[in-house]
Image: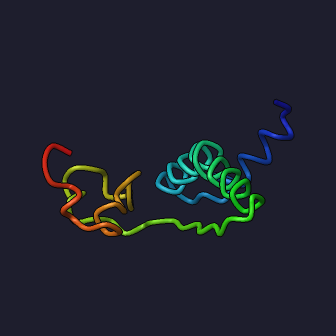
Amino acid sequence: VTSEVVDQVYNEYIGNAEDRAQVRDGLLDAIGDPLFVLSAIEVARYHRDAGNPVYFYEFQHRPSSATGVVPEFVKADHTDEIAFVFGKPFLAGDV
């Protein structure tokens, strides 16, 4: 990795941060984008190219069950949308 690439990544995600919380959020985005977003876009493109309809969304509603369990800066965690999309009956039992 060249210093130019490092500078570009830094400027994109952290460069304009004004406080520690913005640095944290930028770092989380810098980690999450290549791990989750880019791979999801790639899979969506494969499905699109195969002629299938593709829908892409970002769920950000913080569920009330997160209170006291995850830090306040976390909007929604992976799979939090399941209860909202399919309903709470799917969460019965040991989940």
Q: Residue furthest left?
A: 93
At which x and y percent is residue 72? 31, 58
The picture quadrant where one finds residue 1 is top right
The reply, left or right, for residue 71 in relation to residue 39 is: left
Looking at the image, which is closer to me, 84 or 20? Answer: 84
The reply, left or right, for residue 2 in relation to residue 22 is: right
Residue appearing at x 34%, y 58% in the figure: 80
Residue appearing at x 65%, y 69% in the figure: 53
Q: Residue furthest front?
A: 51
Residue appearing at x 53%, y 57% in the figure: 22
Residue appearing at x 59%, y 69% in the figure: 55
Looking at the image, which is closer to me, 2 or 32? Answer: 32
Looking at the image, which is closer to me, 43 or 47? Answer: 47
At which x and y percent is residue 74? 38, 56
Quadrant for the C terminus, please: top left
Vertical order, 75 against 43 (above or below): below
The reply, left or right, for residue 71 in relation to residue 23 is: left
At which x and y percent is residue 38? 67, 50
Looking at the image, which is closer to me, 85 or 7? Answer: 85
Q: How is the image coloured?
A: rainbow
